[in-house]
Amino acid sequence: QEIKDMIDITLTSINTIAFLYCCFMFGTTSYIGFNSIKGKYVNDTNSKSILFILLFFIYLLTAFNNTDYFGYRDIVYATNGHNILHLDPWYGYIAEFVHNNYLLFRIVVWGGALILIIVSAKLYGIHSLHFLVLFFIAFESIFNYGRASLAMGVYYLGIILILTKEQKFKIVRTLLGIALIIISYQFHKSMALLIPISIFLFMPLNKRMLLLILIASPLLVLGIKYQFAGLLQSGFEGVDEELGSTFSMYSQREMAASNWKGFLSSIISYSRFYI
């Protein structure tokens, strides 16, 4: 009960102030991020770097710029037991653990995803601060609202554990990596489309392979966006009429966009994420 009564996010829909806040946060975080990687020597622990990561984290918790933010808020509040979103029960366990506190829910889900991505970058030998600045600019608009972010974070860590050339405990790292890739499916069913094509990561990357990936990515995007829109709607039938209606409207909106303009928009918006 004490956790449930803690400070939580009370905003229920986007308004002008919230929109301006998001614009300010994105601009400020981007500016500080760029400044933190300027110069010949970049330190992950200087004041600018720490401020950038802190703002990145805060922006994940307060991403009011997308209506899904408020949809998840309603879902977390409506969760009774672990049966949240029906298809992804682990989010129900998380909501139950934080006693339906949406702020804590976002800290666990999106904060956890951010930590997994940072760990993946470090394990792979990528300079984490440079990577985070690029990641924020390129993918923040997608990363900050979908619960698939946690699934992707788990997936990335699994892939990195397999791909790293570190020979110490190689078998254990490989088995753990495979386990994490499989577990990522439990956090979002769309991973069923991504996991099979992971084999491309273990093939030599030449021009022909790169072209194949570029061609396959839009098809992957369309499959996830339109096939799973219907699954989201059907998942709520008999569970919650109000939430079912919300996802019904979402599904209809996505299907209505299933013309060449809608496909092109989806490809532009989402392909970079899966590539």
Image (cartoon, rainbow, N blue to C red):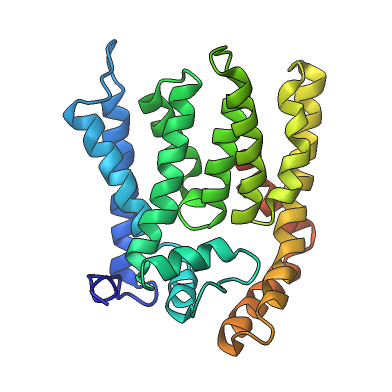
Inspect this view and state whether residue 225 appears.
yes
Q: Is residue 23 above or below residue 180?
A: below
Image-quadrant location for residue 197: top right
Residue 102 occupies quadrant: bottom left
Up-down relation of residue 265 to residue 215 (above or below):
below
In the image, 24 versus 67, the foreground residue is 67
Residue drawn at (51%, 68%) of the image: 92
Of the 4 image quadrants, the one containing the C terminus is top right
Query: As rendered, which of 63 and 103 lies closer to the eye?
Result: 103
- Residue 153 percent across, percent down from the top left: 52, 42
Is 227 located above or below residue 217 in the figure? below
Residue at point 82% right, 20% down? 208
In the image, 220: left or right of 170?
A: right
Q: How many marks?
A: 0
Evaluate whether residue 28 shows in this view.
no
- The image quarter containing residue 12 is bottom left
> Along the horizontal axis of the image, is 259 left or right of 170?
right
Residue at the image position 73 percent from the left and 17 percent from the top: 205
Using the image as rendered, state which of residue 153 and residue 4 is in the foreground: 4
Q: Position of residue 196 (x, y in %)?
A: 78, 40
Expressed as whole percent of the image width and height from the top left, the position of residue 163 reads 62, 21
Say which residue appears at 72% left-offset and 63% top-offset: 228
Left or right for 71, reference 260: left
Quadrant the N terminus occupies: bottom left
In the rendered view, does 257 fall on the left or right side of 134? Answer: right
Q: x%, y% of residue 190?
A: 69, 54
